Amino acid sequence: MGGTVRWGVLATGGIAAQFTTDLMAMEDAEVVAVASRTEASARVFADRFGIPRAYGSWSALAADPEVDVVYVATPHHAHRAAAGLALEAGKAVLCEKALTIHAGEAEELVGLARERGLFLMEAMWMYCNPLVRRMRKLVADGAIGEVRTVQADFGLAGPFAADHRLRDPAVGGGALLDLGVYPVSFAQLLLGEPDSVQAHALLSPEGVDLNTGMLLGWSDSGASALLSCSIVADTPMTASVTGTKGRIDVPHGFFHPERFTLHRADGSAEEFAIAGDGPVERHSLRYEAAEVMRCLRAGETESPLVPLDGSLAVMRTLDAVRDRIGVRYPQEAAHPARALPSAPRTPPPTAGLAVTPA
């Protein structure tokens, strides 16, 4: 695939609008269609962004011959159906995180993509951020020695009403899938899949997690990660990685950082900052879009920056956390709970480490 990549956007919520805005600022991307459950909603979105075609069904978007890749921006509970529909129609897919509502659905989706030889990627924009990539390479190159601890948190104060989607188990509500996926993904980017998971949570009357603390462990290295997520507390949203020879501190907004600091054992410190326009670049989703388009042009069906095995490993950890805190979603009835680990442990990804963007 060469030239302009043509995108179809499936869903019309806030994240879909943010992603579409960033796509339209890219010279090699074009948004040619949008779909929603109603044509009226799709038309409003299309008119807002000047998108040529608006569909009132997901299947119509999936069948559009001018769409090269579908961006799935639905709530978690619909990821499996929406992304699966696009894959069945032969489309490449970028699907919002968490990849699905539980690991069983994620395994089905990944299996379908691999069976069809089609591109699929979880929209974990953190992994594509130039500074996160730089930090990961520093850690892999031994800049802080052997990693011993990881700390990360993501919390919002809310409050969220009882009828808000974040309080609804049927759509994957709670802090974990919306916010906790970031600290977990951050830890597993550096350490791979844990073999020990402990968790404690405050649950809502509806049965979703409002505030969750997690302790992950890696027996081979002795490393641990202390993570938290919340929809009832405004946390610092910072991260720290400590090794035997130093530490990396990432300030507020660790999942889309503007800068981070490397503290060496000799007491020296070095700051790394993102190139470009600061917050504009820091908040941009264009990095993940650029990675999708690079993969499509190269004929790759998986991204080395956001590998599918890594996404599956994160989903298994999220399932294990929910098992510990007693949160179950209605969709899990067809997928019996499994003990951790449910598959061979996945190490941290190593591909792409040679690339150090400005």
Image: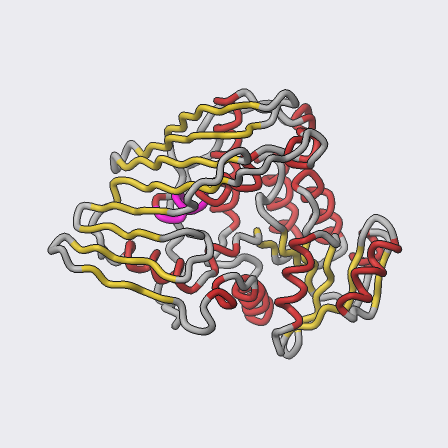
The reply, left or right, for residue 308 in relation to residue 62 is left
Q: Is residue 186 magenta?
A: yes
Q: Is residue 263 visible?
A: yes
The reply, left or right, for residue 252 in relation to residue 171 is left
The residue closer to the viewer here, 346 or 94, is: 94
The residue closer to the viewer here, 241 or 292, is: 241
Main SS of the magenta part reads helix
Colour treatment of the image: secondary structure
The residue closer to the viewer here, 240 or 347, is: 240
x and y, in percent, of residue 64 in the image? 81, 63
Q: Is residue 184 visible?
A: no
What are the residue bounds of the magenta stretch? 184-190
Q: Is residue 291 magenta?
A: no
Question: Residue at (29%, 55%) from the top-left corner?
Answer: 140
Q: Is residue 251 above or below residue 286?
A: above
The reply, left or right, for residue 329 in relation to residue 32 is left
Give the quarter of the figure containing the N terminus: bottom right
The picture quadrant where one finds residue 341 is top left
The reply, left or right, for residue 350 in relation to residue 202 is left
Q: Is residue 211 above or below residue 187?
A: above
Question: Residue at (64%, 44%) from the top-left corner?
Answer: 109
